Image (cartoon, rainbow, N blue to C red):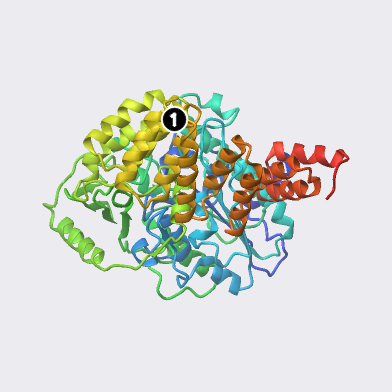
Amino acid sequence: MAFRACIGLLLLLLGAPPAQGEGHPPNVVLITLDTTRADHLGCYGAEGVKTPNLDTLARNGVRFERAQSPAPLTVPAHASLMSGLVPRRHGARDNALHLLPSDVPLLAESLSRAGYDTAAFVSSVVLDRRVGLARGFRIYDDRVRVGRREAFNYEERAASQTNAAVFEHLPKLKPPFFLWVHYFDPHLPYVPPPPYDAQFRGRPYDGEIAFMDAAIGRLLGELPGSLVVIAGDHGESLGEHGEASHGVFLYQSTQRVPLIVNGPGIPVGRVVGERVGLVDVMPTLLDLLKIETPKEVDGKSLVPLLRNKKWKDPGYEMETLFPALAYDWAPLRGLVRGDLVTIDAPRPEVYDLSTDPAQEKNLGTVRPRARRMLESLRREGATKTEAKQDSLSAERRMRLASLGYASGASGDASLDPKDGIVLLGVLEKSREAIQRRRPQDAIEPLRGVLEENPGNLQARLALVSALLGAGQPAAAVSAARDALTRHADDDLVHFNLANALAAESAHRPEALGEAGEHYETTLRLNPRRADAYLNFASLLVSTNRHEAARSVLERAGDAGVADPDISAERGVLELMRGRKEAAIAHFKEALRLNPFAADVTEALRRLKATPGDTH
């Protein structure tokens, strides 16, 4: 495999003809790099990193030095990349609460109509099909519940697992095809696998990028002759401006992204210094393939830049609603034109990137050009776009919570994120302590956050988790009840209270009944919450109510919840009833949803090898 990968990548970089034969358009491969800073890749000048595959692609193609993301969040950025529209126009402006409207034209739809087979493989729950980006793809593989690393409860799959899914389907794709592969590895928490953990000791973020780069080499080794686009969706603050990760601010640490184009007909060794944006990717690809571009796009084709022609910087919008939706702080909007960056905030910010690339010296609005840019931002911001509320957002919110994307906190809507970031830093460190199984280290810091901001739902729910992890169920119940007084109709609050009561029942048996009531309330508010079905069933099993537990899990199926853990638990319950064939059917369904579940694979193997009841 490695030898074939090297040969394939060499052919690709030498501009080999499309594998499907002369006279046919090339296959198109779009690889998006989640949470990847441009300045942490070797081809962008980073030292001591290990990105040979990306570096070679850039060296033998076109690298855009100053590519701009429209948002520091995965869904809005990818929606802009796929639609050519800025977030305020496509409407998918947040990871947790907004869906992409069905009338927004997408790149995959254009390519499908032009005769391309289409397939997408995403690596995080953030991009599951409900977001709306699956339109136009014949295959949309979002089986991400396979990458739960020890000590972390979040849903992604590693680059190697995503590649395995791609290689499974690759022989079934009919050329010419459009393949989108999304890698999520550099996202928090940074836990690179061996040998990258040792090679990048103390620099785990770079280790994740190196692991991802190796996966890119293996992927492209199977795709010689393809037209390849590499694009980051957003970067990572890594502590700059007080932000550990991304989502709150609009500085270049999160807004400058890598963008590389390589393949047949693409110039070799060119570096484009003009500022471009992710909104330009869709019109560029359609232009290269001579397919009509939807008229309403905001982006521009970059083909003139590929051909070394003149380019007028149109200015690039950026925004983040995350501070408002997650913490009830002020949202931010920005505009980048040339080297001038303007950010509309309670205290507006202006930076000249030519003299202040780290954005440490706020120039204010003394410059006439900056004032005009700020006025333009405010005019455009007053033009509202209807964003489709995610009817499943409550279910998604719990799955997104471990990524830091949950919405629902309450605070001061006028608070400048520059002032709120201190509280967020404490919250993020507390979450990390909980994830690393040090919950006792999170309790007092979270209480401090709540003293300053008592309406912060995320901090209160994190406190519930910390208290449970520290073996203090009674205190966890109290914290959850406090949250319930402020958010009585939030299924997430009822779910956390039910979990706390279930834990407390070990010392106070009468809490079991109340726990069941809150699980029922959770499922009434959100009948698609997989973890509520699982925890409720587990509670019933603990009291030997196996039939009731089976009934709860059947309700999940009736609600359309497809979850590998639920299928596996249903198999276990059927096995306890002596129904071997029914158990096998559920275990097979669990493996269909999560092919990497080794325990289910082993259980299925043993069941098939053991004679038993077949009714």
Residue 251 appears in the picture as rendered:
no
> Residue 190 in the image: x percent, y percent?
48, 33
> Residue 420 in the image: x percent, y percent?
24, 40
Instruction: Establish if 151 lies above or below 144.
Output: above
Judge left or right: residue 61 versus residue 310. right
Q: Helix, strand or loop at disc 1?
A: helix
**Residue 611 placement: quadrant:** top right
Amino acid type, mark 1: Leu
The residue lying toward the viewer, choosing from 28 and 346, is 346
The residue lying toward the viewer, choosing from 612 and 606, is 612
To which residue does mark 1 refer?
Answer: 468
Instruction: Establish if 440 lies above or below 221.
Output: above
Pick out the residue farthest to the front. Answer: 510
> Residue 614 in the image: x percent, y percent?
85, 48
**Residue 302 placement: quadrant:** bottom left
> Residue 202 in the image: x percent, y percent?
46, 24
